[in-house]
Image (spheres, rainbow, N blue to C red):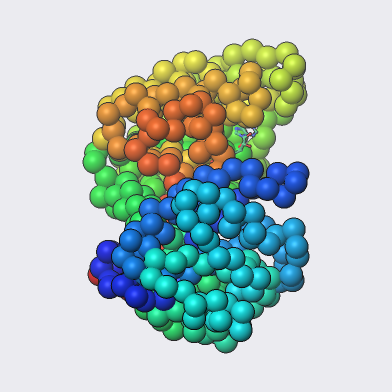
Amino acid sequence: MPKKSVMDIDVKDKRVLVRVDFNVPLDQEGGVADDTRIRAALPTIKYLMEQGARVILASHLGRPKGKVDDRYRLNPVAGRLQDLLGREVTKVDDCVGDEPARAIEKMRPGDVLLLENVRFYPEEEKNDPAFASRLAKLADVYVNDAFGTAHRAHASTEGVARVIPGVAGFLMERELEMLGRAVYNPERPFVAILGGAKVSDKIGVIGNLLEKVDTLIIGGGMANTFLRARGYETGKSLLEPDKVELAGELMNKAREKGIEMLLPVDLVVALAVDPDSEQKVMPADQIPPDWMALDIGPESTNIFGKAIRKAGTVLWNGPMGVFEMAPFARGTFEMARALAESGAVTVVGGGDSVAAVKKAGLADKISHISTGGGASLEFLEGKVLPGVAALQDK
Ligand code: ADP
Ligand code: MG
């Protein structure tokens, strides 16, 4: 069921509490090192301002562990937001209680106020109902635009929407629409590429996608466990011995369902996880005992690329190799290019995969780059995100 968005409700003159994801990386001096997340929330904030709402912003920053910690105050964020909006942003030093209440009383339509870090209270992550009510008391309606924390049932992401009506912001809406379209209503053929370090991180994703895709491509460290299930030796490669059986079962399931499952046919192997280590390309069934697979090989890239070119929808989560090191980044970057060049609807989720696409300079050629690492994974697992479930249905 689609969720109501800010467009579906009247916000004029209302006090609107907006949960944003301003959990930005900070630099050495405590300044904002990367304002991507602040920029991502601007469409919702600007829309609410233009509609004459009183815009009250709430976010967490870092891990202050339920205590006031000056390193995690949102003051630098307020400064950057003010620059980006070109308009005054009032920052208060608490997120509940008298100080915010007084500041909100003084707000006029179109004003913007930023509350202090909600995680200064342990009640936030505990989703304490009394704390959620204190937050809710500050406003008439609630907007969730923090997709990245929607998989957490916290007071500011879930509890508050039980007290006052909640709707989705534009960023949240786009995430749900694009991820939802890929998983539940894909243009076919639907090709999913899964990679990353471990099978164990992605079992739920593989299981859910096996019900939906036409082709499943497995690369990265987790491919080793699948290759092992085929009976191949994997040398010193990252391997999860206790997941070999499961990998075999997943391969059988794919076969039964008539799903094409592609594993690497060749691999870049090295003697150590070290860019200076000796390296060579080997067929996937011939990894020598002392060597480890750190990237997919050129033939694999070709085969995967062909499947991507034929696709109507491509969903990618998890790098094909240790892309943080240049000698083992080729497979991952080639996949990013294949997505960028395909005419398919392309969706990339997962913190490292998104970082890889950005590093390849191809982010603007992808239909949708998900802003939520953990949240997008849980979405791909088919889970209901509590922060989404709490919002009003259309
Ligand atoms: P995402 O954040 O996109 O979901 P993951 O966190 O699951 O991706 O996996 C990313 C990590 O997997 C990267 O740090 C990368 O170095 C690692 N990785 C990929 N391939 C291998 C491999 N063959 N051996 C060891 N680590 C790998
Ligand atoms: Mg990751």
Report the side of 387 relative to 330 (left or right): left
Identify the residue at the far bottom of this view. 130
Q: Locate ligand 1 by image quadrant.
A: top right
Report the side of 39 relative to 191 (left or right): right
User: Which residue is rendered at x = 63% and y = 18% of the image?
Assistant: 327
- Residue 379 or residue 390, whichever sits in front: 390
User: Which residue is rendered at x = 68% and y = 62% of the image?
Assistant: 73
Q: Quadrant of residue 303?
A: top left
- Residue 25 screen position, x and y as percent: 64, 47
Residue 127 in sight here: no
- Residue 221 screen position, x and y as percent: 60, 34
Report the side of 129 relative to 187 (left or right): right
Q: Is residue 239 above or below residue 327?
A: below
User: Which residue is rendered at x = 44% and y = 28% of the image?
Assistant: 362
Q: Quadrant of the C terminus?
A: bottom left
Q: Quadrant of residue 345?
A: top left
User: Which residue is rendered at x = 42% and y = 24% of the image?
Assistant: 337
